[in-house]
Image (cartoon, rainbow, N blue to C red):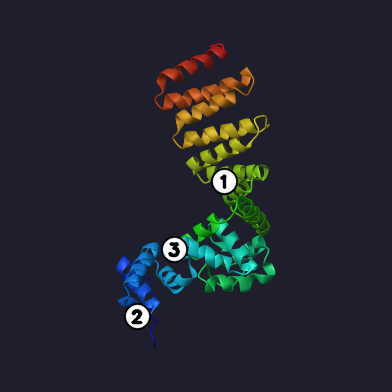
């Protein structure tokens, strides 16, 4: 009976500068090693690629297509590559870069409006080492080939295109269903769709609180308050939820300030309860003088 050797996982680190320079010289041709200018250019490529072999090879292979008078720049090389892409592939890459995380291919196609051109566009991006996928199923993920590709593509977009990509991503994720509320919050905020973002901020905060991630919940409730109008009828509800999350996160003095803000928004016969919770938060965290003064005010209001 034959035995199957179990797979092994190897961690491959970045190339050293010397190793990168040797790879670059090999790409330049057999005579490059004897040329002082080529050796200097190989070292420049090695430093710019920062140990990533594919970047070393690409910069060395296409060095003549770049404006060498400005020096070797991976970002400029990536932008040059993007400029040569077909429109559908470029739109898809921009959406993936703006997302900043692996996307289901069907979601990326929908957001880039290239649903009928999805596979050819993905093939182009993979061949040019601008993106990579985890399979051929529409539910499989697509992402930028490397963080430096993502950063270069995202930085090249103007404000209008940036907002358009975020809005398209949000709508596509909504249509797909089961999207992470925090991701939808981010996309709608970047698209300047604050009304839509607010609902997802509240959902994300409630989810974080339910999963006992109280620090995260408090911060998300804070985002809700930034988006809510001052006269919103549910503003006090969000304030008290944030204060409760701050208490559970061990941030009592911050919670006291939120309780007091909520107390200022309600009639005196309701405010004493919120002030009492603020006093308790202060006393429990060692702020004795202020806590006692606030508690005295509450007792006076109650006629005690």
Look at discs 1 and 3 and give the one toward the viewer: 3
Q: Label for residue 288?
A: none
The answer for how far apart the CA atoms under marks 2 and 1 are is 62 Å
Residue 45 percent location from the top left of the image? 39, 66
Residue 184 percent location from the top left of the image? 61, 50
Asked whether residue 275 appears in the rendered view, the answer is yes
Mark 2 Cα within 10 Å, few/some/many (few <14, many 20+)? few
Q: Label for residue 69?
A: 3
224 vs 285, nearest the viewer = 224
* Picture layout, residue 156 above or below residue 261: below
| First reached walking from the N terminus: tag 1 or tag 3 | 3
Mark 1 lies on a secondary structure that is: helix
Mark 3 lies on a secondary structure that is: helix
Residue at the (37%, 65%) spot, across then down = 44
Residue at label 1?
Answer: 207
| First reached walking from the N terminus: tag 2 or tag 3 | 2
Residue 257 percent location from the top left of the image? 51, 27
Discs 1, 3 touching: Cβ within 8 Å = no
The answer for how far apart the CA atoms under marks 2 and 3 are is 22 Å
Look at discs 2 and 1 and give the one toward the viewer: 2
Q: Label for residue 31?
A: 2
116 vs 299, nearest the viewer = 116
From the viewer's perspective, tell me whether residue 114 is left or right of residue 145: right
């Amino acid at each position: 009976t034959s035995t199957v050797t179990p797979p092994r996982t190897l961690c491959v680190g970045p190339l050293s500068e010397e190793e990168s320079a040797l790879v670059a010289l090999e790409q330049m041709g057999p005579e490059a090693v004897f040329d002082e200018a080529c050796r200097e250019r190989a070292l420049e490529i090695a430093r710019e690629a920062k140990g990533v072999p594919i970047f070393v090879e690409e910069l060395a292979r296409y060095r003549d297509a770049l404006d060498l008078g400005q020096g070797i720049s991976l970002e400029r090389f990536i932008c040059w590559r993007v400029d040569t892409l077909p429109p559908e592939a470029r739109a898809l890459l921009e959406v993936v870069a703006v997302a900043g995380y692996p996307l289901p291919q069907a979601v990326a196609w929908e957001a880039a409006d290239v649903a009928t051109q999805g596979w050819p566009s993905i093939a182009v991006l993979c061949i040019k080492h601008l993106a990579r996928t985890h399979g051929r199923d529409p539910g499989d993920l697509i992402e930028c080939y490397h963080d430096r590709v993502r950063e270069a593509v995202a930085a090249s977009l103007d404000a209008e295109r940036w907002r358009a990509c975020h809005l398209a991503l949000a709508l596509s994720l909504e249509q797909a269903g089961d999207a992470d509320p925090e991701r939808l919050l981010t996309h709608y905020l970047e698209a300047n769709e604050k009304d839509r973002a607010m609902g997802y901020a509240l959902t994300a905060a409630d989810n974080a609180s339910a999963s006992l991630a109280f620090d995260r919940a408090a911060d998300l409730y804070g985002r809700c308050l930034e988006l809510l109008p001052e006269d919103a009828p549910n503003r006090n509800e969000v304030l008290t939820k944030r204060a409760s999350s701050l208490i559970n996160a061990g941030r009592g003095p911050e919670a006291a300030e939120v309780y007091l803000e909520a107390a200022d928004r309600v009639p005196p016969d309701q405010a004493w309860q919120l002030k009492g919770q603020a006093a308790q938060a202060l006393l429990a965290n060692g702020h004795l003088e202020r806590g006692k003064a606030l508690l005295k005010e509450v007792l006076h209001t109650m006629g005690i």
